[in-house]
Image: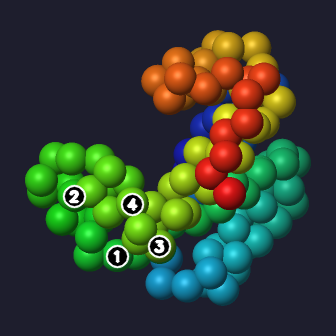
Amino acid sequence: GMIKSIVANSKEQAIKLVVNRVPSAIEAKRVADRLTSISAQFLKTQVESLGFVFEEDLVQKSIRSQRPHVVLYPGSKSSACMNHISARLLNSSAADDGSGIFGFLQKLLGVGSDREIGLF
């Protein structure tokens, strides 16, 4: 699938995983462990798990209203998951060069790599 395509096109590309729409943290860990294990065994590549997002009806409501989920429902479990993943991405070493998706997120959120995120 997708991981195999990324590895085939760019062996230097860091692969990061977000497990989406899971009912529990246990299920998310099971899925992430399986994907990272299979990727290491068969593709000889490391996959870093950034976290997971809980399945919630609130996500579908925000999609229908075409408004950001973390804005409409900031106290939800899925918003907490998204904030955690964002903080991990922004705090990663790849965020330091200011390019790519990391640079885009820094500019969008007004956060520099030398400033604390403060989400957790």
Residue at label 4? 74
Alpha carbons under labels 3 and 2: distance apart: 14 Å
Of the residues shown, which amino acid type is indicated by label 3? Lys
Amino acid beneath label 1: Glu
Q: Secondary structure at mark 2?
A: helix
Q: Residue at x 55, y 85 (%)?
A: 24
Q: Amino acid at mark 4?
A: Pro
Query: Residue at left 27%, top 57%?
Result: 72
- Is the Cβ of the residue at disc 2 closer than 8 Å to that at disc 4? no
Q: Nearer the viewer, residue 13 or 28?
A: 28
- Relative to residue 72, is residue 12 depicted above or below? above
> Which residue is at the front of the view, 53 or 73?
73
In the image: residue 82, left or right of residue 28: left
| Quadrant hosting residue 7 | top right
Q: Nearer the viewer, mark 2 or mark 4?
A: 4
Residue 96 occupies quadrant: top right
Closer to the eye: label 1 or 4: 4
Tell whether label 1 touches label 3 (CB within 8 Å): yes
Does residue 69 appear in the picture of this structure? Answer: yes
Residue 106 percent across, percent down from the top left: 58, 24
Closer to the N terminus: mark 1 or mark 2?
Answer: 1
Residue 118 x/y as whole percent? 67, 46
Residue depicted at x 76% and y 71%: 33
Q: Which residue is mark 1?
A: 56
Q: Earlier in the sequence, mark 1 or mark 4?
A: 1
Q: CA distance from mark 2 to mark 4?
A: 11 Å
Q: Position of residue 76 (x, y in %)?
A: 41, 71
* Residue identifier under label 2: 62
Q: Which badge, 3 or 1, is on the more N-terminal residue?
A: 1
* Residue marked by disc 3: 77
Residues at marks 1 and 4, CA–CA distance in whole angstroms: 13 Å
Q: CA distance from mark 3 to mark 4?
A: 9 Å
